[in-house]
Image: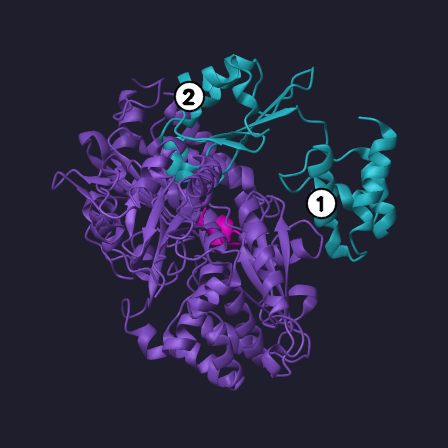
Amino acid sequence: MPEKLRTILVCQGTGCISGGAGQLQEALSAELTLQKLNAVAEIKHTGCHGFCQRGPLVVIEPEGIFYTKVTQNDVPDILHSLRPGAPLVERLLYYDTVINQPIKSFHDVPFYYKQQRLVLRNCGVINPENIDDYLDAGGYKALRKALAMKPEEIIKEVKDSGLRGLGGAGFPTGRKWEAASQSPGNVKYIICNGDEGDPGAFQDRSVLEGDPHSVIEGMIIAGYAIGAHHGYAYVRNEYPFAVHRLGVAIEQARQRGYLGKNILGSKFNFDVEIFQGAGAFVCGESTALVLSIEGKRGMPRSLPRPRTTEVGLWGKPTVLNNVKTYANIPLIINNGAAWFASRGTEKSKGTAIFSLTGKVVNSGLIEVVMGTRLREIIFDIGGGIPGGRAFKAVQTGGPSGGCLPAEMLNMPVDFDSLTSAGSMMGSGGMVVMDQDTCMVDIARYFLDFTQRESCGQCIPCRIGTKQMFDILDSIIKGRGKPGDIDLLLELGHSIKESSLCALGQSAPNPVLSTIRYFRDEYEAHIFEGHCPAGVCTHCL
Amino acid sequence: MDANLIETGTKEILSTHGKGHNKLVPILLDIQESFGYLPENSVRQVSDFLNVRIGQVYSVASFYKRFQLTPIGKRRVTVCRGTACHIRGAPQIVTEIENTIHLKEGETSADLEYTLETVACIGCCALAPVITVNKAVYGAMTPRTAKELFNDSSRGDKNA
């Protein structure tokens, strides 16, 4: 057995790249040759390993030695540590302040060991630009298995798994596929929604950057299940690395016969092309996204609108799912519906992926089983609030979601619990706020976003969100009036009920949830001219 | 920018695309990337090429935030105002940069040196607050480091 061997994994997610991971990897390669260690170790770049805040990250396998905040200056020491008997580079290890000890392997770092990484199984582990890495990790096995099944068997498997769409709304994936497969017509489409426009969310980007083949494999299986031969991967133009790596993956999949004509000898044809979004939050809405691919303004269709599964792209039946939803499909086909359904809560199966950010010690990309409590996510994985400050709220679901207070920390995280608490799963942003965050300012912040992003087609959304924004703006500037809170509630409820699409229907959530849980902060601004968090400079 | 350069550049871009209506956004993205904005003559060429009314091209161009109809500066400074950046102080960073390079959000300097804009989220939330200068990303900014970045103009060129 050859002595090689250590693999030095250098995270090349967007976070680590902006910290200099590209130059770091070049320096590692040069030094490896210089120290004549090429026979001992190989260097591999990976997608996002998750712990973005501590980046650039370097992992040395097979031990899982975990070096954080690595710079080019650390390169000689890291390579020296590979020699027999040489010590680890202790200064780069993660230091656990609870046990007051450095931790050697990332498996033992609290940020990781409380997670269950299923969708993210390959992120940070394989080289996303090398299809052989994906194949070695069991890639495209599910496709092979699926092509030997009948389409209706696949749909049944996905239905039985209980998988729900991970783009935000949580519609059952199997039912969506079934509807599209039963819609008449020979031409159908598959669309992957990677138009991750929520501020504070980056998990779709990370999956596309770290494991693009899993998404492609899911799309091909979906195509086979509903009888579609063409797929579009809609990715934000703001995500250049995701676009690049997905493009490389599609090309490699074509060369190996996983995409194109007569896939793996099955007579099934399917291909995927990338469509770059040009920056419009409302294009996350399915009918708007479809129009945008058709070369039009991305404005949701008016009501009553047929389902996209009946009349979608170019008027044809279309299945549109989120990036993470497709990445789950190979897992379900390989392991079976029962395996998948054994994870999670009664109505939310599998895992949820969050971008954990804000006022939290450990920021990054995390994956937990549905039903994990907010407290475990924020305090065990996230390490709590930095600087000894007090937790105030956690915002989930971006501009469509809400802010939940400390009393809700024991709530299990799943689609239905979040919705009943006045927030939502949304695309999976989770922003932690401490005592220094003003909840009225946050509400104003989100309304500023939604009223900028409103497509302007329907009046409740276009004018209503602007009115709400103006009221919030006057409150934080110390010009709030008695009655403003009631007016916000009234506006919020009518916008929710009468807007044309999910953007408007959910836009009031940040305001309604902050009034529900933090009404005293609104009152302090309005009646005392005082901002309890000390954020609003006109109310100090 | 030289009118001939724009015409030949646009022609080159068009030659790499097919003629379907679904090519409109991809073509405009390429033009935006090449010239930093959508020159009027390019828009005319696109309209002819795709046989789409010029008003239709502008209707699409004005809808998506990526597209600009006027030239932008050599250094495109983008401040992220995503949620994580917001609560970690992005508004103060915008103000500091506005005062340092003497531009308001959305403006381009007369000498086309700088454009200052904000963006909803660039997805580097763990590094908040974040700004980008062209393609270079700067994380964990404070008003002071932001000011230093633009006072020391050579740094603003990283990977530019």
Q: Which residues are magenta?
A: A497-508
Q: Nearer the viewer, mark 1 or mark 2?
A: 2
The residue located at (61%, 77%) in the rendering is A263
- How far apart in space, not on screen, are marks 1 and 2 (Cα)? 33 Å
Q: Amino acid at mark 2?
A: Gln
Q: Amino acid at mark 1?
A: Val
Residue A499 painted magenta:
yes
Residue B51 painted magenta:
no
Q: Which residue is mark 1?
A: B60
Which color has been applied to chain B in this rendered view?
cyan
Is residue A430 placed above or below A147 in the rendered structure?
above
Q: Are the two marked residues, 1 and 2, in contact with CB atoms closer than 8 angstroms? A: no
Which color has been applied to chain A in this rendered view?
purple
Whether residue A309 sits left or right of residue A384 in the image: it is: right
Q: Position of residue A168 (x, y in %)?
A: 43, 57
Task: Give the residue furthest to the front.
Answer: A36
The quadrant in which the N terminus of chain A is found is: bottom left
Give the chain of mark 1.
Answer: B
Is residue A472 placed above or below B143 in the rendered structure?
below
Q: Which residue is mark 2?
A: B92
The residue located at (45%, 35%) in the rendering is A20
Image quadrant in which you'd find residue A228: bottom right
Image quadrant in which you'd find residue A207: bottom left
Q: Is residue A301 visible?
A: no
> Few, some or many C-alpha atoms within 10 Å of disc 1 (few <14, some 14-19, many ≥20)?
some
